[in-house]
């Protein structure tokens, strides 16, 4: 079965190979291994660690027999790919976002649900087993999760209240994984002819690409000011629009924007550029600025 997640994975591997080839002959200091503090997973039954079990009905025996010794919310006899990834990174298994019992989101959350699709399906889970939590819903849930847990973390009064919440500063350093697409094709085989399904695949791929592109936080938007329908109220200015006094205020998350006011970089963009200058990424050869005075 054609799995879009596999295509995305293969593309990433090929990209890494091409990057490695392009740097041959250049002396580059080995980078330290990535230290991912958390995993956020989106997908279907291939990576659901208990969401559908929590929301609708638990997986029955003999699921889980090879590892957990009992049903563990997974559609397998044991661990899933995302479980092995978590083990390799030294992180705990992901708690499902929809599970309210015994959850711990300190090191991430799992938004995947069995039966999920990339494209919304106008069918009931009781009809054909399709989850109401399509990929776009999962991305909205993640935005809600990020906003709400950040609020709770800052409101917490002692370490015990924080120990099951993710650290707000770690969202940008987390590993984000996607494993979804097979249910779109299974539905297509059931509803469409082969030519119709082939014609629908580009739309499935495009919606997958749109879901994994940051929108809940568009990095290319202008943070400060009001910019809608070709009407611009610049940062710190006021303008009457249809009888309403509109102020060009700052957005709520300047750290996710490249542009501060449409002309100048945000602090986050300035820091990113400065860091790459300091560590030598923009130099040829790539020498960190702390070693730039040394003779080679």
Image: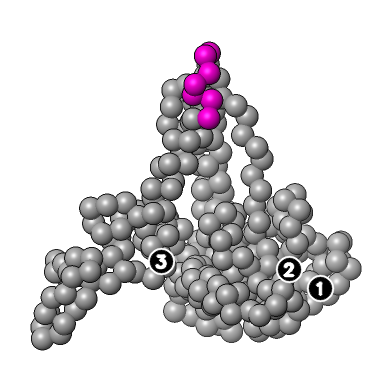
- In the picture shown, does residue 193 fall above or below 115? above
- Categorize mark 3 by other alpha carbons within 10 Å: few (<14), some (14-19), many (20+): few
132 magenta-colored: no
Judge from the rendering whether residue 117 lies leftward or rightward of residue 246; answer left or right: right
Name the disc covering residue 71, or none. 1
Return the disc, 3 or 2, that comes first in the chain's sequence. Answer: 2
Q: Are marks 3 and 2 in contact (CB under 8 Å)?
A: no
- CA distance for labels 3 and 1: 41 Å
Task: Write the residue at 31% across / 63% down.
Answer: 223
- In the picture shown, does residue 211 fall above or below 243? above
- CA distance for labels 3 and 2: 36 Å
Task: Write the residue at 42% across / 53% down.
Answer: 268
Q: Quadrant of residue 200?
A: bottom left
**SS at circle 3:** loop
Query: In x, y percent, where is residue 72?
Result: 79, 71
- Categorize mark 1 by other alpha carbons within 10 Å: few (<14), some (14-19), many (20+): many
Q: Are marks 2 and 1 in contact (CB under 8 Å)?
A: yes
Judge from the rendering whether residue 233 lies leftward or rightward of residue 218; answer left or right: left
**SS at circle 1:** loop
Residue that mark 2 sits on: 74
Q: Which residues are magenta?
A: 290-296
* Rendering colour mode: one colour
Residue that mark 3 sits on: 253
Name the disc covering residue 224, or none. none
Return the disc, 3 or 1, that comes first in the chain's sequence. Answer: 1
**SS at circle 2:** loop
Query: In x, y percent, where is residue 288?
Result: 51, 30
State the residue in front, 97 or 276.
276
Query: In x, y percent, where is residue 38?
Result: 65, 59
- CA distance for labels 2 and 1: 7 Å
């Amino acid at each position: 079965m054609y799995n879009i997640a596999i295509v995305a994975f293969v593309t990433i591997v090929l990209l890494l190979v091409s990057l490695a080839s392009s740097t041959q002959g250049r002396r580059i200091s080995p980078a330290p291994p990535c230290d991912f503090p958390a995993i956020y997973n989106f997908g279907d039954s291939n990576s659901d660690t208990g969401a559908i079990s929590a929301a609708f009905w638990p997986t029955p025996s003999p699921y889980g027999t090879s590892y957990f010794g009992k049903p563990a919310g997974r559609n397998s006899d044991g661990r899933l790919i995302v479980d092995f990834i978590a083990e390799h990174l030294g992180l705990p298994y992901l708690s499902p976002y929809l599970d309210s019992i015994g959850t711990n989101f300190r090191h991430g959350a799992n938004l995947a649900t069995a039966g999920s699709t990339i494209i919304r399906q106008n069918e009931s889970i009781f009809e054909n087993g399709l989850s109401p939590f399509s990929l776009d819903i999962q991305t909205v849930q993640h935005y809600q999760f990020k906003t709400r847990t950040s609020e709770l973390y800052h409101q917490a009064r002692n370490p015990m209240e924080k120990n099951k919440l993710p650290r707000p500063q770690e969202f940008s350093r987390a590993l984000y994984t996607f494993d979804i697409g097979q249910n779109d094709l299974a539905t297509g085989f059931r509803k469409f002819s082969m030519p119709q399904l082939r014609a629908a695949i580009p739309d499935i791929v495009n919606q997958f690409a749109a879901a994994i592109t940051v929108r809940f936080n568009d990095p290319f938007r202008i943070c400060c000011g009001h910019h809608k329908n070709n009407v611009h109220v610049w940062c710190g200015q006021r303008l009457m629009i249809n009888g309403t006094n509109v102020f060009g205020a700052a957005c709520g998350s300047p750290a996710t924007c490249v542009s501060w006011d449409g002309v100048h970089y945000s602090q986050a963009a300035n820091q990113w550029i400065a860091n790459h200058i300091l560590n030598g990424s923009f130099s040829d050869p790539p020498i960190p600025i702390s070693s730039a005075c040394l003779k080679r």
